[in-house]
Image (spheres, helix red, strand yellow):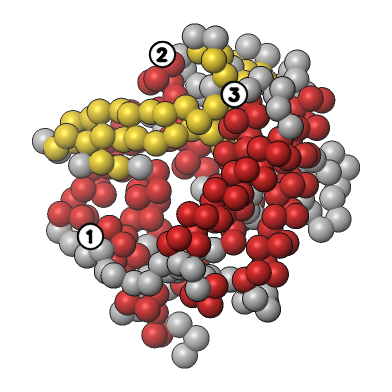
Amino acid sequence: MKISFSSYSQYSRCGEQFRLRRIDKVELPERPASWTVFGNAYHKAVELYELGRREQEIEGLFRDAWDLEMLDAIDTQPDFEMWDRAPRTKNVQTELDTKFSNGLEYVANYAKRADRESEEWHLALKDGEPLAELPFEVELKVDGQDVLMRGYIDQVRSWNGQLVAVDLKTGSPSNTDHRQLGLYCWAAGRVLGEKIPFGRFFYSKLDEVPRSGDKMGKYSDWYQAEAYDDEYWYEQIAEMIRGVDNRVFLPNVSELCNRCDVKPACRAFPTVGN
Protein backbone atom coordinates (compact mmCIF):
# COMPACT_ATOMS: atom_id res chain seq x y z
CA MET A 1 0.00 0.00 0.00
CA LYS A 2 1.30 3.46 -0.94
CA ILE A 3 0.42 6.43 1.26
CA SER A 4 1.20 10.12 0.94
CA PHE A 5 0.26 12.92 3.28
CA SER A 6 -2.40 13.90 0.76
CA SER A 7 -4.12 10.51 0.89
CA TYR A 8 -3.75 10.22 4.67
CA SER A 9 -5.16 13.70 5.35
CA GLN A 10 -7.94 13.18 2.83
CA TYR A 11 -9.04 9.96 4.55
CA SER A 12 -8.97 11.57 7.99
CA ARG A 13 -10.71 14.73 6.74
CA CYS A 14 -13.52 13.09 4.74
CA GLY A 15 -13.76 9.36 4.20
CA GLU A 16 -16.41 9.74 1.50
CA GLN A 17 -14.16 12.00 -0.59
CA PHE A 18 -11.35 9.46 -0.19
CA ARG A 19 -13.64 6.63 -1.32
CA LEU A 20 -14.91 8.45 -4.39
CA ARG A 21 -11.48 9.60 -5.52
CA ARG A 22 -9.16 6.77 -4.59
CA ILE A 23 -11.22 3.60 -4.13
CA ASP A 24 -14.19 3.78 -6.49
CA LYS A 25 -12.41 6.31 -8.75
CA VAL A 26 -15.62 7.86 -10.04
CA GLU A 27 -15.39 9.39 -13.50
CA LEU A 28 -16.17 13.10 -13.44
CA PRO A 29 -15.19 15.94 -15.78
CA GLU A 30 -11.74 17.35 -15.05
CA ARG A 31 -12.04 20.74 -13.35
CA PRO A 32 -8.73 22.63 -13.19
CA ALA A 33 -8.55 25.78 -11.07
CA SER A 34 -6.57 28.99 -11.18
CA TRP A 35 -5.32 28.44 -7.64
CA THR A 36 -3.83 25.08 -8.62
CA VAL A 37 -1.99 26.60 -11.59
CA PHE A 38 -0.81 29.42 -9.34
CA GLY A 39 0.33 27.18 -6.48
CA ASN A 40 2.20 24.75 -8.72
CA ALA A 41 3.93 27.58 -10.61
CA TYR A 42 4.95 29.27 -7.36
CA HIS A 43 6.46 26.08 -5.93
CA LYS A 44 8.33 25.29 -9.15
CA ALA A 45 9.74 28.82 -9.40
CA VAL A 46 10.97 28.77 -5.80
CA GLU A 47 12.44 25.28 -6.24
CA LEU A 48 14.41 26.26 -9.36
CA TYR A 49 15.47 29.54 -7.75
CA GLU A 50 16.93 27.70 -4.76
CA LEU A 51 18.49 24.86 -6.75
CA GLY A 52 20.11 27.51 -8.97
CA ARG A 53 21.71 29.07 -5.87
CA ARG A 54 19.46 32.15 -6.18
CA GLU A 55 21.30 33.35 -9.28
CA GLN A 56 18.32 33.34 -11.69
CA GLU A 57 15.55 35.91 -11.89
CA ILE A 58 12.70 34.37 -9.94
CA GLU A 59 9.98 36.28 -11.83
CA GLY A 60 11.15 34.72 -15.10
CA LEU A 61 11.12 31.29 -13.50
CA PHE A 62 7.55 31.90 -12.38
CA ARG A 63 6.44 33.00 -15.85
CA ASP A 64 7.92 29.87 -17.43
CA ALA A 65 6.37 27.61 -14.80
CA TRP A 66 3.00 29.36 -15.20
CA ASP A 67 3.02 28.81 -18.96
CA LEU A 68 3.72 25.11 -18.53
CA GLU A 69 1.03 24.70 -15.89
CA MET A 70 -1.48 26.53 -18.08
CA LEU A 71 -0.71 24.35 -21.08
CA ASP A 72 -1.23 21.24 -18.98
CA ALA A 73 -4.47 22.55 -17.45
CA ILE A 74 -5.92 23.64 -20.78
CA ASP A 75 -4.99 20.30 -22.32
CA THR A 76 -6.89 18.63 -19.48
CA GLN A 77 -9.93 20.90 -19.77
CA PRO A 78 -10.00 23.49 -22.60
CA ASP A 79 -13.46 24.80 -21.65
CA PHE A 80 -13.06 27.55 -19.04
CA GLU A 81 -16.74 27.13 -18.12
CA MET A 82 -15.80 23.75 -16.67
CA TRP A 83 -13.03 25.14 -14.45
CA ASP A 84 -13.54 25.69 -10.74
CA ARG A 85 -13.56 29.30 -9.64
CA ALA A 86 -14.13 31.27 -6.47
CA PRO A 87 -17.83 32.10 -5.81
CA ARG A 88 -17.42 35.86 -6.20
CA THR A 89 -15.29 35.74 -9.35
CA LYS A 90 -17.05 36.76 -12.58
CA ASN A 91 -15.04 34.48 -14.87
CA VAL A 92 -12.02 32.22 -14.92
CA GLN A 93 -9.88 34.53 -17.04
CA THR A 94 -10.25 37.35 -14.52
CA GLU A 95 -9.25 34.97 -11.75
CA LEU A 96 -6.25 33.73 -13.73
CA ASP A 97 -5.09 37.30 -14.39
CA THR A 98 -5.28 38.07 -10.68
CA LYS A 99 -3.45 34.90 -9.68
CA PHE A 100 -0.69 35.55 -12.23
CA SER A 101 -0.20 39.08 -10.92
CA ASN A 102 -0.19 37.83 -7.33
CA GLY A 103 2.32 35.13 -8.25
CA LEU A 104 4.81 37.62 -9.63
CA GLU A 105 4.50 39.64 -6.43
CA TYR A 106 4.80 36.60 -4.17
CA VAL A 107 7.95 35.19 -5.79
CA ALA A 108 9.57 38.65 -5.84
CA ASN A 109 8.85 38.96 -2.12
CA TYR A 110 10.29 35.48 -1.54
CA ALA A 111 13.53 36.49 -3.26
CA LYS A 112 13.76 39.69 -1.21
CA ARG A 113 13.29 37.78 2.02
CA ALA A 114 15.77 35.09 0.97
CA ASP A 115 18.35 37.79 0.32
CA ARG A 116 17.66 39.55 3.61
CA GLU A 117 17.88 36.34 5.64
CA SER A 118 20.54 34.54 3.64
CA GLU A 119 22.88 34.10 6.60
CA GLU A 120 20.48 33.09 9.34
CA TRP A 121 17.80 31.19 7.43
CA HIS A 122 19.03 29.26 4.41
CA LEU A 123 18.58 25.88 2.78
CA ALA A 124 20.59 23.04 4.20
CA LEU A 125 22.86 21.08 1.87
CA LYS A 126 23.22 17.37 1.18
CA ASP A 127 26.18 16.31 -0.93
CA GLY A 128 26.59 19.97 -1.82
CA GLU A 129 23.03 20.37 -3.15
CA PRO A 130 20.31 22.55 -1.57
CA LEU A 131 17.53 20.55 0.05
CA ALA A 132 14.57 21.76 -2.00
CA GLU A 133 11.76 19.37 -3.01
CA LEU A 134 13.45 16.59 -1.05
CA PRO A 135 11.88 13.24 -2.01
CA PHE A 136 11.30 10.58 0.63
CA GLU A 137 10.20 6.96 0.67
CA VAL A 138 9.85 5.21 4.01
CA GLU A 139 9.07 1.49 4.01
CA LEU A 140 7.02 0.16 6.93
CA LYS A 141 5.40 -3.11 7.93
CA VAL A 142 2.01 -2.34 9.47
CA ASP A 143 -0.45 -5.07 10.53
CA GLY A 144 1.37 -7.48 8.24
CA GLN A 145 1.10 -5.17 5.22
CA ASP A 146 3.97 -3.54 3.38
CA VAL A 147 3.42 0.22 3.39
CA LEU A 148 5.37 2.84 1.48
CA MET A 149 5.11 6.38 2.82
CA ARG A 150 6.31 8.78 0.16
CA GLY A 151 6.24 12.41 -0.82
CA TYR A 152 8.26 15.58 -1.27
CA ILE A 153 9.36 18.10 1.34
CA ASP A 154 9.42 21.67 0.04
CA GLN A 155 12.54 22.66 1.94
CA VAL A 156 14.88 21.66 4.74
CA ARG A 157 16.52 24.74 6.17
CA SER A 158 19.27 25.37 8.66
CA TRP A 159 18.57 27.66 11.60
CA ASN A 160 21.55 28.22 13.89
CA GLY A 161 22.85 24.79 12.96
CA GLN A 162 19.48 23.06 13.53
CA LEU A 163 17.62 21.45 10.62
CA VAL A 164 14.02 22.57 10.17
CA ALA A 165 11.41 21.21 7.73
CA VAL A 166 9.59 24.01 5.89
CA ASP A 167 6.41 23.79 3.85
CA LEU A 168 5.51 26.67 1.53
CA LYS A 169 1.87 27.72 1.41
CA THR A 170 0.16 29.98 -1.12
CA GLY A 171 -3.29 29.73 0.44
CA SER A 172 -4.82 30.84 3.69
CA PRO A 173 -3.12 29.86 6.97
CA SER A 174 -6.49 28.58 8.19
CA ASN A 175 -6.27 25.70 5.68
CA THR A 176 -2.97 24.28 6.94
CA ASP A 177 -2.60 21.03 8.85
CA HIS A 178 0.32 20.84 11.29
CA ARG A 179 0.41 17.05 10.93
CA GLN A 180 2.00 17.69 7.55
CA LEU A 181 5.03 19.24 9.24
CA GLY A 182 5.07 16.35 11.68
CA LEU A 183 5.27 13.86 8.82
CA TYR A 184 7.91 15.87 6.97
CA CYS A 185 10.13 16.22 10.03
CA TRP A 186 9.83 12.49 10.68
CA ALA A 187 10.48 11.53 7.05
CA ALA A 188 13.33 14.00 6.56
CA GLY A 189 14.96 12.66 9.69
CA ARG A 190 14.81 9.17 8.20
CA VAL A 191 16.31 10.35 4.90
CA LEU A 192 19.04 12.54 6.36
CA GLY A 193 19.85 10.41 9.40
CA GLU A 194 19.42 13.36 11.74
CA LYS A 195 16.61 14.21 14.13
CA ILE A 196 14.51 17.19 13.02
CA PRO A 197 12.52 18.40 16.04
CA PHE A 198 10.83 21.45 14.50
CA GLY A 199 8.92 22.49 11.40
CA ARG A 200 7.45 25.74 10.09
CA PHE A 201 5.05 26.87 7.42
CA PHE A 202 5.93 29.85 5.23
CA TYR A 203 2.86 31.73 4.02
CA SER A 204 3.38 33.69 0.83
CA LYS A 205 -0.13 35.15 0.93
CA LEU A 206 -0.07 38.73 2.19
CA ASP A 207 -2.58 40.20 4.62
CA GLU A 208 -5.00 42.77 3.21
CA VAL A 209 -3.17 45.30 5.38
CA PRO A 210 0.22 43.69 6.07
CA ARG A 211 1.51 44.10 9.58
CA SER A 212 5.09 45.11 10.21
CA GLY A 213 7.34 42.27 9.04
CA ASP A 214 4.59 40.60 6.98
CA LYS A 215 5.12 42.53 3.75
CA MET A 216 7.25 39.72 2.29
CA GLY A 217 5.21 36.78 3.55
CA LYS A 218 5.34 35.39 7.05
CA TYR A 219 6.35 32.30 8.98
CA SER A 220 4.09 30.22 11.16
CA ASP A 221 4.91 29.43 14.74
CA TRP A 222 7.50 26.75 15.39
CA TYR A 223 5.77 23.37 15.51
CA GLN A 224 7.27 20.66 17.67
CA ALA A 225 7.55 17.37 15.80
CA GLU A 226 8.56 15.09 18.68
CA ALA A 227 5.02 13.73 19.09
CA TYR A 228 5.04 12.53 15.47
CA ASP A 229 7.39 9.64 16.03
CA ASP A 230 7.46 6.06 14.73
CA GLU A 231 4.72 5.00 17.16
CA TYR A 232 2.40 7.79 16.07
CA TRP A 233 2.69 7.07 12.35
CA TYR A 234 2.43 3.29 12.81
CA GLU A 235 -0.81 3.81 14.75
CA GLN A 236 -2.23 6.29 12.26
CA ILE A 237 -1.43 4.13 9.25
CA ALA A 238 -2.79 1.01 10.97
CA GLU A 239 -6.09 2.78 11.68
CA MET A 240 -6.30 4.01 8.10
CA ILE A 241 -5.62 0.52 6.71
CA ARG A 242 -8.29 -1.05 8.96
CA GLY A 243 -10.79 1.60 7.91
CA VAL A 244 -10.12 1.13 4.20
CA ASP A 245 -10.14 -2.67 4.43
CA ASN A 246 -13.50 -2.55 6.24
CA ARG A 247 -14.87 0.18 3.92
CA VAL A 248 -15.37 2.71 6.69
CA PHE A 249 -15.76 5.97 4.78
CA LEU A 250 -17.56 8.54 6.90
CA PRO A 251 -18.42 11.83 5.16
CA ASN A 252 -17.59 15.17 6.75
CA VAL A 253 -20.22 17.65 5.62
CA SER A 254 -18.93 21.21 5.95
CA GLU A 255 -18.38 24.43 4.00
CA LEU A 256 -15.44 22.64 2.32
CA CYS A 257 -17.96 20.60 0.34
CA ASN A 258 -18.53 23.62 -1.89
CA ARG A 259 -14.96 23.31 -3.24
CA CYS A 260 -14.88 19.50 -3.48
CA ASP A 261 -14.32 18.18 -7.00
CA VAL A 262 -16.27 14.97 -6.37
CA LYS A 263 -19.39 16.59 -4.87
CA PRO A 264 -21.58 15.68 -7.89
CA ALA A 265 -21.15 12.02 -6.95
CA CYS A 266 -21.34 12.46 -3.17
CA ARG A 267 -24.32 10.99 -1.35
CA ALA A 268 -23.90 13.40 1.59
CA PHE A 269 -23.66 16.64 -0.40
CA PRO A 270 -27.41 17.07 -1.19
CA THR A 271 -27.94 17.80 2.53
CA VAL A 272 -25.65 20.86 2.36
CA GLY A 273 -27.56 24.14 2.42
CA ASN A 274 -31.02 22.54 2.85
| Residue 201: x %, y % from top left | 61, 39
CA–CA distance between discs 2 and 1?
A: 35 Å
Q: Mark 1 points at which residue?
A: 23
Q: How crowded is mark 3: few (under 14 residues within 10 Å), some or many (20 or more)?
A: some
Q: Position of residue 29 (x, y in %)?
A: 38, 72
Which residue is drawn at the image coordinates 50% and 13% (left, top)? 126
SS for callout 1: helix
> Which residue bears the numbered disc 2?
193
Q: Which residue lies furthest to the right in this view?
A: 212
Q: What residue type is labelled 1?
A: Ile
Identify the disc placed on residue 88.
none
Judging depth in this view, the residue of 25 and 255 nearest the camera is 25
Q: Is mark 3 on a helix, strand or loop?
A: helix
Q: Which residue is the site of mark 3?
A: 51
**x%, y% of residue 64?**
62, 43
| Mark 2: amino acid | Gly
Please, which residue is most extreme toward the bottom here? 274
Give above or below for 253 relative to 97. below
